[in-house]
């Protein structure tokens, strides 16, 4: 049974408009447990020095902890060799790195990249940008009204000019999760690599990148109880070694000469130009420890909360529509209420202390599919409670009555 962990998260003691804070926007960013906050504070107070440069005590200690964090991330996703783990500023930066670097090397005029209709903008726009630069094409794998990505259509989209398939592990709007193992099998049979946006998936289920056989895997620390500004790119060594650096600067070079040019560092430093967010990486390592301590009970618990929320929403509020009804999904519910605007619902419940998301959720093609301009979204984390669900439903019910 999942224990109550709200006390681990000091921000949940905050009052919102003189109401108890009910935070249901963890799919946007998760709150931070005290152990992560303490890690950040301790680093600033006792172990703050630039990594990979100095030989003094602080520099060596910080470098050691940074590289230990890389090993812990690698172990968390079963990435094999830690040289395949690149620290970035977030999943957006990770995807842009691959789109730009892989694209410069392997994508040319007349080629194509396949993405799904359910992608976050961060897994759409970078591919559009490289396609425009190279004269390539974007092909789109659709999803059904139930939120299921139509994987059976994937093979028909791939041809000899397909250079990449980029797919979400879980939709940030619908919560639905395609079978990544099935996708990689189909795509690899055609000799094409696969990139997976794991931002929403890694939070709610164990991820084994080698078992899934993905070529690239990206996620952000702030969804996983770590600070903002830290992200991860896992890439198979065979691809990372062939890809040119994404940015130039310190720490990604082996030699620099004004007359003979520059040679680059080996993996993963080739892709980590400049001063790294070593504080964020080490804090992410501590957040991963915390997630592992919670165990599988956390995933089952948040699924139970989300199911209760969705059921009560349908039973108590007339005219509600829930989007993404696949049985295997992350613990979030996106919905609209007939006769109301999602932003109005979100603004009213905020005054009652309930934080939900409204808008396009950085996924406008999903909105277009359903013929809406925005949705409300409630997303759950292990620090939420049954009381949160009940009070949130009461607030939404009140808001709907006020707006009709």
Image (spheres, grey):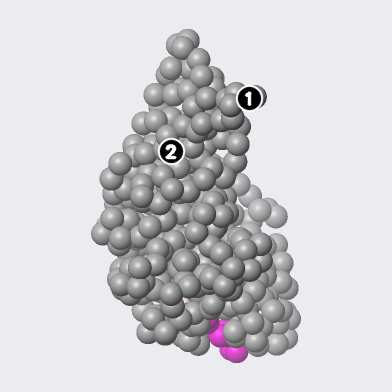
Question: Do the CB atoms of the residues marked 1 and 2 lie less than 8 Å apart?
Answer: no
**Residue displayed at 70% across by 82% down:** 340
Where residue 164 appears, as percent x and y from the top left, is 46, 66
Q: Residue furthest front?
A: 259
Characterize the local packing of mark 1: few (<14), some (14-19) or many (20 or more) Cα atoms within 10 angstroms.
few
Q: In this view, does 366 lie above or below 44?
A: below
Q: Magenta residues? A: 317-324
| Residue at disc 1, secondary structure | loop
**Residue displayed at 56% across by 85% down:** 321
Based on the picture, tell me whether residue 194 belongs to the magenta stretch.
no
Q: Nearer the viewer, mark 1 or mark 2?
A: 1
Name the residue carrying label 1: 259
Q: Looking at the figure, which quarter contains the N terminus?
A: bottom left
Name the residue carrying label 2: 268
Based on the picture, tell me whether residue 321 belongs to the magenta stretch.
yes
Q: Which residue lies furthest to the top in this view?
A: 56
């Amino acid at each position: 049974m999942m224990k109550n962990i709200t006390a681990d998260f000091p921000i949940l003691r905050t009052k919102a408009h003189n109401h108890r804070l009910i935070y249901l926007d963890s799919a946007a960013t998760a709150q931070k447990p005290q152990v992560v906050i303490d890690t950040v504070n301790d680093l600033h107070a006792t172990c703050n020095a630039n990594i990979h440069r100095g030989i003094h005590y602080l520099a060596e200690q910080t470098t050691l902890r940074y590289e230990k964090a890389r090993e812990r991330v690698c172990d968390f996703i079963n990435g094999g060799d830690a040289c395949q783990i690149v620290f970035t500023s977030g999943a957006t930066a990770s995807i842009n790195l691959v789109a730009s670097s892989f694209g410069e090397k392997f994508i040319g005029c007349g080629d194509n990249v396949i993405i799904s209709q359910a992608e976050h903008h961060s897994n759409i726009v970078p591919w559009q940008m490289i396609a425009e630069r190279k004269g390539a094409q974007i092909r789109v794998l659709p999803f059904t009204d139930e939120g299921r990505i139509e994987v059976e259509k994937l093979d028909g989209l791939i041809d000899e000019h397909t250079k990449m398939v980029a797919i979400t592990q879980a939709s940030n709007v619908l919560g639905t999760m395609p079978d990544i193992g099935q996708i990689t099998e189909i795509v690899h049979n055609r000799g094409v690599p696969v990139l997976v946006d794991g931002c929403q998936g890694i939070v709610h289920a164990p991820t084994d990148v080698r078992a899934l056989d993905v070529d690239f895997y990206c996620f952000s620390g702030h969804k996983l109880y770590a600070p903002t500004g830290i992200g991860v790119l896992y890439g198979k060594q065979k691809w990372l070694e062939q890809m040119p650096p994404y940015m130039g600067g310190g720490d990604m070079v082996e030699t620099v000469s004004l007359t003979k040019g520059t040679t680059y560092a080996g993996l993963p430093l080739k892709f980590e130009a400049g001063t790294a967010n070593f504080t964020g990486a080490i804090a992410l390592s501590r957040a991963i420890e915390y997630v592992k301590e919670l165990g599988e009970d956390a995933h089952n618990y948040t699924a139970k909360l989300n199911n209760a929320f969705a059921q009560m929403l349908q039973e108590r509020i007339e005219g509600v529509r829930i989007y993404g009804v696949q049985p295997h999904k992350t613990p979030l519910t996106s919905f609209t209420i007939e006769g109301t605007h999602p932003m109005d619902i979100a603004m009213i419940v905020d005054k009652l202390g309930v934080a939900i998301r409204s808008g396009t959720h950085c996924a406008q093609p999903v909105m277009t599919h359903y013929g809406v301009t925005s949705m409300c979204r409630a997303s759950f984390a292990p620090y939420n409670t049954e009381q949160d669900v009940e009070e949130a439903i009461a607030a939404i019910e009140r808001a709907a009555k006020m707006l009709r």
